[in-house]
Image (cartoon, helix red, strand yellow):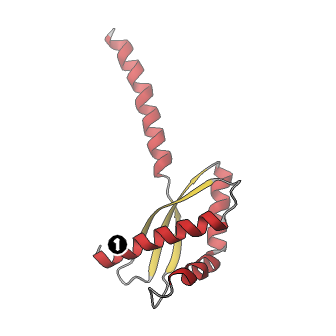
Amino acid sequence: MSIRTDKVSSLLQRELSAIFEKELPRSGPLVTVTEVRMTADLGIARVYVSVIGSEAQRAEVMEYLDAENKMIRKTLSAKIRHQFRRIPELEFYEDRLFEQANRIEQLLKSVKPARDEEQH
């Protein structure tokens, strides 16, 4: 990626995080923007979102983001309109990296005690 796309990605990540902090209910699951990837023409922003909660809550958050995409983009536009001529289209994807890392850690912990017992 170019320096420009990196800067735009970083800015969008910060602004979208702030929007989610204000717009999403505090009693719901924890929602974090983990990464934003821009296309080369800066026309599309792929927003990766980590949702810590139950499967039902994850599905609900992703449905909300898809349903409210235009509202989120409009709110984003109001915040960054002086920095961009054209606000990129937003595509939301669920980032399950945190969940996968926890699963791997649990597997490694379960293997270690078994290996320790074999050595004794």
Residue drawn where x is 55% and y is 78% of the image: 76
Secondary structure of residue under mark 1: helix
On screen, residue 69 versus residue 43, left or right, reads: right
Badge 1, how many Cα within 10 Å: few under 14, some, many 20+?
Answer: some
Q: Tell which residue pokes out farthest to the left in this image.
A: 2
Res. 7 image quadrant: bottom left
In this rendered view, identify the residue nearer to me: 13 or 103. Answer: 13
- Residue under pointer 1: 6
Residue drawn where x is 59% and y is 70% of the image: 19
Residue 104 x, y percent position in the rendering: 43, 38
Res. 23 image quadrant: bottom right
In this rendered view, identify the residue nearer to me: 91 or 33. Answer: 33
Residue 91 x, y percent position in the rendering: 52, 73
Task: Say if 37 sits above or below 82 in the image.
Answer: above
Task: Say if 97 sits above or below 15 in the image.
Answer: above
Residue 18 x, y percent position in the rendering: 56, 67
Residue drawn where x is 63% and y is 49% of the image: 53
Question: For the C terminus, which image quadrant?
Answer: top left
Question: For the N terminus, which image quadrant?
Answer: bottom left
Residue 38 appears in view: no
Residue 113 x, y percent position in the rendering: 41, 20
Residue drawn where x is 64% and y is 66% of the image: 22
Residue 43 appears in view: yes
> In the rendered structure, which amino acid carries the disc numbered 1?
Asp
Task: Say if 62 sits above or below 86 in the image.
Answer: above
